[in-house]
Amino acid sequence: MLNTIIKTTLSAVLLTTAMTSFAGDLNVSKSVTVNASPDTTWKMIGDFNHLDVWHPVVVSSVLTHTATSDTRLLTLGNGATITEKQVSRDDAKRSYTYAIVLSPLPVSDYVSTISVSPAADGKSTVTWSSSFDAKDATDEEAVTAITGIYEAGLNNLDKHFNQ
């Protein structure tokens, strides 16, 4: 039992250290409170391969599953593609973290977490946050691009759950 606890703690520390080393200096965090329970909201957004279900810019998502990780290839409405790797997941806490592997976005070292938490009156709050560096753009341009992506997705969730 003690051996398992030590291994679990060591794994968590190593994962956090690895994620921190990949994370950039810029940060974006956006949230929306939707008129749905956390469980219902998590069913909508919690599947790593379903960004195309709730984000209006993503037209398809193709998952590649290996023994060590899940990778999704997102196709956007303009034909551009983004490859992202899931780096951690906690269904009990309704949260997953992923990193961009390949993208036309003006960012590098991008690591992001999407989470759902309870809110008042049976509602839930979706929080989408990231850290990254600007790539071939100013810091302001990179932050604006990521902010726009988050707002489009979160606004669409808000519309979906508040119809």
Image (cartoon, grey):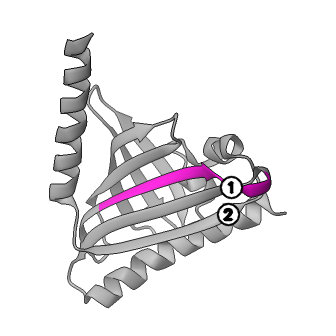
In the orientation shown, which residue stands out farthest toward the front?
Answer: 2
Query: What amino acid is at disc 1?
Result: Ala
Residue 119: give its label.
1
Span colored in magenta = 111-121
Say what secondary structure mark 2 lies in.
strand
In the picture, the disc for residue 33 is 2
Q: Which of the 4 image quarters holds residue 57?
A: bottom right
Residue 98 lies, with reference to residue 150, above or below; the image says above
* Measured Cα–Cα span from mark 1 to mark 2: 7 Å
Q: Position of residue 108 (x, y in %)?
A: 22, 69
Q: Nearer the viewer, mark 1 or mark 2?
A: 1
Left or right of 129 on screen, residue 87: left
Q: How many marks?
A: 2
**Does dot 1 land on a helix, a strand or a loop?**
loop
145 in magenta: no
**Which residue is at a point 65% across and 71% down the rendered structure image?**
155
Q: Quadrant of the N terminus?
A: top left
Residue 59 horizontal/vertical position (percent): 55, 59
Q: Earlier in the sequence, mark 1 or mark 2?
A: 2
Residue at image point 41% right, 39% down: 89
